[in-house]
Image: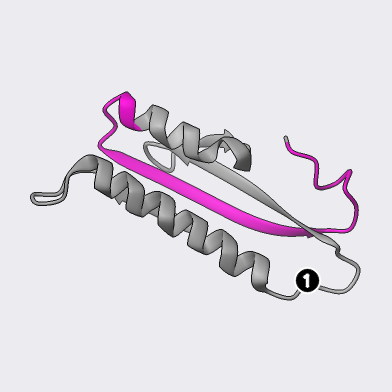
């Protein structure tokens, strides 16, 4: 999933937009986890990037994704770019959080 969200809407306030972004991310994670893993894989690892734009996005661990979104909003970001890529891995060592 690669998506850029705008945080300025004439009718919807920013906290509600942030809630909808987080909900969409959680929905995407649930959808990816529900898919059948390929042969030889036991786990899914998500590589996440987050930033104000695609060029300024940096790698963020999945566990810190929501907190990082809140930090961007606190810093008055006008847009949020989220990229999540699921990779199937065979062992827990490969799936370690980085």
Q: Nearer the viewer, residue 86 or 15?
A: 15
Magenta stretch contains residue 75: yes
Up/down of 66 relative to 34, above or below: above
Query: Residue drawn 41% across and 45% down?
Result: 81
The image position of residue 79, as x and y in percent, is 30, 41
Mark 1 = which residue? 37
The image position of residue 43, as x and y in percent, is 80, 58
What is the magenta range? 73-97
Query: Residue drawn 37% across and 30% down?
Result: 72
Q: Nearer the viewer, residue 62 or 56?
A: 62
Res 7 visible: yes
Res 56 visible: no
Numbered disc 1: secondary structure? loop
Left or right of 29 in this view: 78: left
The image position of residue 7, as x and y in percent, is 24, 43
Query: Residue drawn 89% across and 58% down?
Result: 90
């Amino acid at each position: 999933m690669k998506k850029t969200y705008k945080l300025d809407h004439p009718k919807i306030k920013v906290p509600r937009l942030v809630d909808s972004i987080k909900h969409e991310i959680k929905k995407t994670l649930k959808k990816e986890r529900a898919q059948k893993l390929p042969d030889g894989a036991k786990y899914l690892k998500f590589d996440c990037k987050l930033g104000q734009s695609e060029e300024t996005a940096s790698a963020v661990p999945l566990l810190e994704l929501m907190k990082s979104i809140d930090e961007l909003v606190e810093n008055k970001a006008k847009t949020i770019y989220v990229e999540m890529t699921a990779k199937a891995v065979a062992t827990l060592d490969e799936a370690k959080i980085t």
